[in-house]
Amino acid sequence: MIADASLHVLNRNLVLEMARVTEAAALAAARHLGRGDDRAAFRAASHAMWVTLNGVDITGRVIIGDDHPVESGENESTAGVSEGTTVGTSGGPAVEVAAQPLEGATICATGAPNSLALLVIAEPGGITPAPPGTYMEKIVVGPGVPDGVLSLDQPPGDNVRALARVKGLEPADLVVCVLDRPRNEAVVAAVRKAGARVQLIQDGDVSGSLATADPFSGVDMLMGSGGAREGILSAAAMLSLGGWMQGRPLVRDAADRKALRAAGLTDVDRTMDLADMVHGEVMFAATGVTDGGVLRGVRFHSGTGITHSLVARTTSGTVRRIEAHHDLGRKGPEIRSS
């Protein structure tokens, strides 16, 4: 734990600073919505996040961040939230940072739903590293599901039936979100055989995890495999929002095993609970880039950019939804909380 007790006081303000960081990334990415260039969208979001994050009073070390290499011809204007770097003014508490400046760069580039800007801040040692290009099996549900009901060690159909019993529903009443990939076809088939409905998403399984914690999203559970980094970000969201999650590295070959061990995961076949992925004092922020089931996307209107964000912290259990109106001709957005 961080010895400086003042962090608990700073958290209340710091979580709003985090919203400003994800808002900046979302606004930058939204300029590229539907333009067909996912790399340009990601680079714009990452640079905007880097600039804004460097104005926050923290001494932050990036554990998960932008792993997109700068290509020939790109310059300083493309600098992003790179892993291993220090961010912030160096005038505040020491923290770890996990950032996804633009989850769903492809869906932003095509104008599809559920693209987000994401940021996690935790105390030192609170974020488990995840090597780029690695994958994780996941099962995620929102608040109210006791430990021991669901498990990655039991078949997907059993998890569907167990969740239905806990919720007092029939399996046919449930919607399970699954990333639409060939490796998840067996999960989809098992969920359908159990009687539940499936929502296939093309990208962005953090958005699917968030949906499980929103009673109005219509999503009850997320299952299947997706990016390991997105798994860590989802774990931070669930820890902050009171949800439940398990994750297990999906080891495809010797290269995956080597990368995971190099990142510090000595037992790469172990099923991880929330506390194994993120722990301690954690703050989570997400801003919509395109419309989704949990957050609306960016709107531009008469010189104003309108963003919708969700922020949460584990210390208080408080979850805030923020609508911000940004005067694009000057700094200092007007923030309206709802």
Image (cartoon, rainbow, N blue to C red):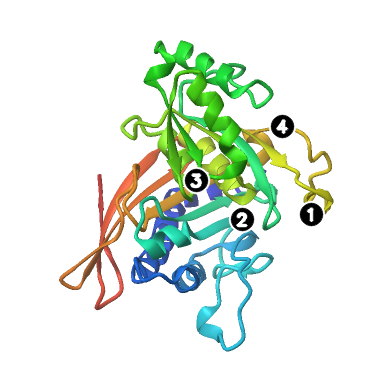
Q: How crowded is the residue under tag 3: few (<14 C-alpha within 10 Å), some, or many (20+)?
A: many
Residue 95, given in percent of the width and then of the height, sits at 61, 55
The residue tagged 1 is 259
Q: How far apart are marks 1 and 3 (CA)?
A: 22 Å
The residue tagged 2 is 95
Sequence-first disc among 3 and 2? 2
Q: How far apart are marks 4 and 3 (CA)?
A: 19 Å
* Badge 2 vs badge 1, beta-carbon distance below 8 Å: no
Sequence-first disc among 4 and 3? 3
Quadrant into which the C terminus falls: top left
The residue tagged 4 is 271
In the rendered image, the vertical position of residue 303 relative to residue 161, given as above or below: below
Secondary structure beneath disc 2?
Answer: strand
Sequence-first disc among 1 and 3? 3
Q: At label 4, which amino acid type do we have?
A: Thr
Q: Which residue is at the front of the view, 70 or 36?
A: 36
Sequence-first disc among 4 and 2? 2
Quadrant into which the N terminus falls: top right
The residue tagged 3 is 206
Side of 81 where 287 appears, left or right: left
Q: Which image quarter: residue 70?
A: bottom right
Residue 94, given in percent of the width and then of the height, sits at 63, 58
In the rendered image, the vertical position of residue 212 relative to residue 307, given as above or below: above
* Badge 4 vs badge 2, beta-carbon distance below 8 Å: no
